[in-house]
Amino acid sequence: MLSASQRGWFLVIPDHFDIMRPAIREAATVAVVVCALVALLAFGPGVADLLPAPQETRVQREPAAVVRLADGERALVAWGQRGAQRARISATEQRISVAEQRNIVRFLSARYRVASDDVTQVVGYALRAGRETGMDPLLLLAVMSIESSLDPAARSPAGAHGLMQVLTRVHEERFEPFGGPEAAFEPLPNIRVGAAILKEYLRREGSVEGALKSYVGAALRAHDGGYGAKVLAERDRIVEAARGRAA
């Protein structure tokens, strides 16, 4: 049986442990860190391979387009990054204002005898497709003007349909997200598909003139019969109209 002094000594022991607990925990933490460092040095890449790989930053590869109303100016547009091919394209460096859009609608409506409400819708869709694809919306409007005179129901003997006269039989799969080939006669699907096709040709050919030559089906011919010049001249007229200068 323990004496009173012995019992008192044992009662003091827990108090000493309570005082020592923080020091013990700190020492244990240091030991764990040291062991981990030793393991990394000893095993090297084998341990590093167990760690999660850092997430790669996705590089934007879509073309960066600019839209600017400038005097017959052709801006350079970079496709992708890191020394990617550069393509010549008419474009702007600022947004087309509401007043300029109204001027464009007024001009196209009178020139092609199309109701202003319908032209307003087409202009809005061209701006939307331009933002989505990185294409110049004024170039898209010029293509529509030359191809179909802004008639969404236009058909050609060769099987081209809609505002941008897309060859539906060749690009049928592009209309699947919109419900099938009949969507070629709807303004928005037709403009989006036509803009995507023109963008691919621009990437491949490296110039607006070359892209238009392919768009009209003259890629393997010596010339495009003046098609590209007509489209670019029409775009220049649209630019002038936006400024309120068109007759």
Image: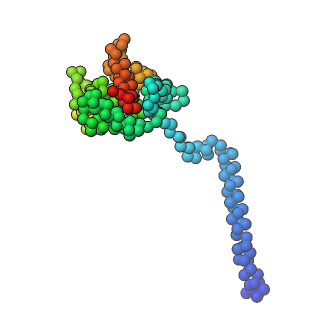
Residue positioned 40% across, 19% down in the render: 210
Residue 21: horizontal and vertical position, in percent?
70, 69
Quarter of the figure with the C terminus: top left
Picture layout, residue 96 above or below residue 215 = below
Report the side of 223 relative to 39 (left or right). Answer: left
Instruction: Please state which of residues 73 and 148 is positioned toward the viewer in this rendering.
Output: 73
Residue 152: horizontal and vertical position, in percent?
25, 32
Residue positioned 37% across, 11% down in the render: 222
Report the side of 92 relative to 120 (left or right). Answer: right
Instruction: Please state which of residues 245 and 208 is positioned toward the viewer in this rendering.
Output: 245
Q: Quadrant of residue 209?
A: top left
Residue positioned 70% across, 54% down in the render: 34
Residue positioned 54% across, 27% down in the render: 83
Picture layout, residue 5 above or below residue 242 = below
Residue 162: horizontal and vertical position, in percent?
26, 30
Instruction: Please state which of residues 18 and 212 is positioned toward the viewer in this rendering.
Output: 212
Residue 204: horizontal and vertical position, in percent?
42, 23
Report the side of 100 relative to 24 (left or right). Answer: left
Judging from the image, the colouring scheme is: rainbow
